Image (tube, rainbow, N blue to C red):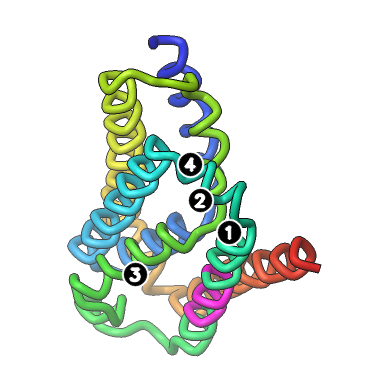
Amino acid sequence: MLTSLATIAVLHWAVLLVPGFNFVLIGQLAAGGSRDRALAAVGGMTLGTLCWALLAVLGVGVVFAAHPALRLGVQVAGGLYLLQLAWKLWRAGAPQAAADASGLSRVAAFRVGFTTSMLNPKIALFYGSVFATAMPLNPSVLLSAAAVALVFGNSVLWHGGLAWALSQRAVQKAWLRHARAFNRGSGLVVGTYGARLLWQGWRDGA
């Protein structure tokens, strides 16, 4: 049991530490003066993590293996969603008042965090393959519950810590001075990631 949990912990932190869309989203909201919205997005992300972990222990990897078209659909949907968000970031203008910098309500921030986590093929791949294969063939209920709690706790710790660190006043001041450049840079990162997902989906489906 401890070996399985240690393996999952190491692999999960490896995935978390690679900057991706979640990092960009939290940075946009927190550095833009919206710590509460950043934390709302974190809530959505961690709920997505919980859902994927539960699906993994219930056998989502087997479903994806048996129905590759389903995995492809998730990948394409995620890519299109990220491209839409990238376009919105690119079109964002000069700095606004701190309270309005994010352009999202708390509910919308939560929804974006949850949706992107659920549609992110990187997350789906981790839970559908890596997470599932780190577990024994017939894990006990205790091990399954511990594994789900472990990745959920990791997600809360990492994403919550990012929201707190990136919402510090010094970071916010830097963001306000260079908001247009940050928005466009973030848009390029998100757009590139979304385009890559679509390319991979086209290549895998070809």
Measuring from the top left, give residue 108's x and y in whole percent: 25, 75
Determine whether the residue tagged by mark 4 lies in a helix, strand or loop: helix
Label 4 Cα crowd, 10 Å radius (few <14 / some 14-19 / many 20+) = many
Determine whether the residue tagged by mark 1 lies in a helix, strand or loop. helix
Q: Are discs 1 and 2 less than 8 Å apart at CB?
A: yes
Left or right for 142, reference 191: left
Q: Mark 3 is on which residue type?
A: Val
Q: Nearer the viewer, mark 2 or mark 3?
A: 2
Placement of the N terminus among the 4 image quadrants: top left
3D distance between C-alphas at marks 3 and 4: 20 Å
Residue under numbered circle 4: 127
Label 3: which residue?
112
Q: Tell me, yes or no, if residue 62 can be seen here.
A: yes
The residue at 32%/66% (across/down) is 29
Q: Nearer the viewer, residue 169 or 148?
A: 148
Q: Are marks 1 and 4 in contact (CB under 8 Å)?
A: no
Q: Could you say whether the residue bearing mark 3 is in a helix, strand or loop?
A: helix
Disc 2 target residue: 124
Q: Position of residue 50 (x, y in %)?
A: 30, 45
Q: Determine if the magenta segment contains residue 194.
A: no
User: Which of the 4 image quarters holds residue 113?
Assistant: bottom left
- Asked whether residue 83 is drawn in magenta, I would say yes
Q: Residues within 10 Å of mark 1 (few under 14, many from 20)?
A: many
Of the numbered discs 1 and 3, the one sitting upstream in the chain is 1
- The mark lying in front, picked from 1 and 4, is 1
Disc 2/disc 4 C-alpha distance (Å): 5 Å
Q: CA distance from mark 2 to mark 3?
A: 17 Å
**Amino acid type, mark 2:** Ala
Q: Amino acid at mark 4?
A: Tyr
* Mark 2 Cα-neighbour bin, 10 Å: few <14, some 14–19, many ≥20: many
Q: Residue 41 at x, y = what percent?
A: 28, 61
